[in-house]
Image: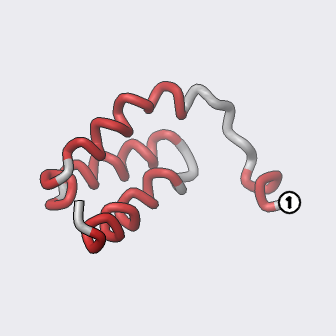
């Protein structure tokens, strides 16, 4: 993956890991998977899919607590 693509992929996936809930995160991942970058780098989608259950088995931290 080129540096330019790495920056674009990271920016696109930010919507996944900053989503407020699992449904929003899944939609963001699906949107990325359907994008040109998602087609160019399907392994990025596969990594997220493979880790999905582990990521979302962690209890959510309320936003007000996270902001301190």
In this rendering, the answer to whether 12 lies above or below 40 is below
- Horizontal side of 33 relative to 14 (left or right) equals left
User: Which of the two residues, 35 or 2, is positioned nearer the viewer here?
Assistant: 2
Name the residue at 58% across, 26% down: 57
Residue 19: x and y in percent read 52, 53
Residue 47: x and y in percent read 34, 37
In the image as oriented, which residue stretches furthest toward the right? Answer: 68
Residue 56: x and y in percent read 54, 32
In this rendering, the answer to whether 4 lies above or below 45 is below
User: Which of the two residues, 17 or 40, is positioned nearer the viewer here?
Assistant: 40
Residue 33: x and y in percent read 23, 49
Q: Quadrant of the C terminus?
A: bottom right
In the image as oriented, which residue stretches furthest toward the front? Answer: 2
Name the residue at 45% across, 48% down: 24
- Horizontal side of 9 relative to 16 (left or right) equals left
In this rendering, the answer to whether 50 lies above or below 66 is above
Name the residue at 29% across, 43% down: 45
Name the residue at 32% across, 62% down: 9
Residue highlighted by disc 1: 68
- Horizontal side of 55 relative to 24 (left or right) equals right
Q: How many marks?
A: 1
Q: Secondary structure at mark 1?
A: loop
**Is the residue marked by circle 1 packed among few (<14), some (14-19), or many (20+) residues within 10 Å?**
few
User: Which of the two residues, 7 or 53, is positioned nearer the viewer here?
Assistant: 7
């Amino acid at each position: 993956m080129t540096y330019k693509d790495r920056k674009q992929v990271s920016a696109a996936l930010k919507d996944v890991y900053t989503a407020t809930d699992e449904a929003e995160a899944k939609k963001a991942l699906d949107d990325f998977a359907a994008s040109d970058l998602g087609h160019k780098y399907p392994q990025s989608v596969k990594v997220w899919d493979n880790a999905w259950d582990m990521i979302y088995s962690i209890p959510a931290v309320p936003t007000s607590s996270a902001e301190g």
